[in-house]
Image (tube, rainbow, N blue to C red):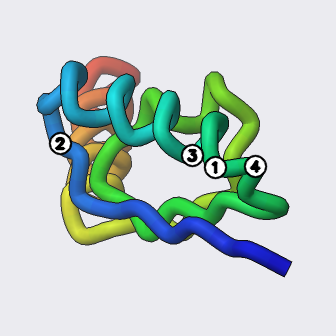
Amino acid sequence: MRIAIISDIHANFPALEQTLKSIEEQNIDAVYYLGDFNEIRKKHIPNLAGNHDVTAVKIHNDVSNHIES
């Protein structure tokens, strides 16, 4: 089984697209993402939350709670 692990894309979209293209060309069996780019979920790749992902959720929740108050 061939596995690709990617992480810490942040806002480097060209690098992400090139990486995903390379993964596809190499017939990888599974891809896992280790966090720090929420948009990866749209590609249905299993992922773990990175430190930026956790912070983004915390900020969102804090703002939402403040607005509801």
**Identity of the residue drawn at 83% across and 61% down:** 29
**Identity of the residue drawn at 14% across and 30% down:** 11
Depth check, front residue: 53 or 68: 53
Quick check: marks 4 and 2 in contact, CB under 8 Å?
Answer: no
Q: Which residue is mark 2?
A: 10
- Give the mark nearest the N terminus, 2 or 3: 2
Q: Amino acid at mark 4?
A: Asn
Res. 19 visible in picture: yes
Element marked by disc 2:
loop
Q: Quadrant of the N terminus?
A: bottom right
Q: Amino acid at mark 2?
A: His
Q: Which residue is mark 1?
A: 26
Q: Position of residue 53 (x, y in %)?
A: 33, 54
Quick check: marks 3 and 1 in contact, CB under 8 Å?
Answer: yes
Measured in 3D between alpha carbons, the distance from the residue under mark 3 to the one under mark 1, in whole angstroms, is 5 Å
Q: Position of residue 65 (x, y in %)?
A: 35, 36
| Numbered badge on residue 27 | 4
In this view, 13 is above or below 5 = above
Res. 49 visible in picture: no
Q: Residue 66 sits in which quadrant?
A: top left
Quick check: marks 4 and 1 in contact, CB under 8 Å?
Answer: yes
In this view, 45 is above or below 3 = above
Position of 32 with respect to 2 (left or right) is left
- Give the mark nearest the N terminus, 4 or 2: 2
Measured in 3D between alpha carbons, the distance from the residue under mark 3 to the one under mark 4, in whole angstroms, is 7 Å
Q: Residue 51 sits in which quadrant?
A: bottom left
Depth check, front residue: 53 or 44: 44
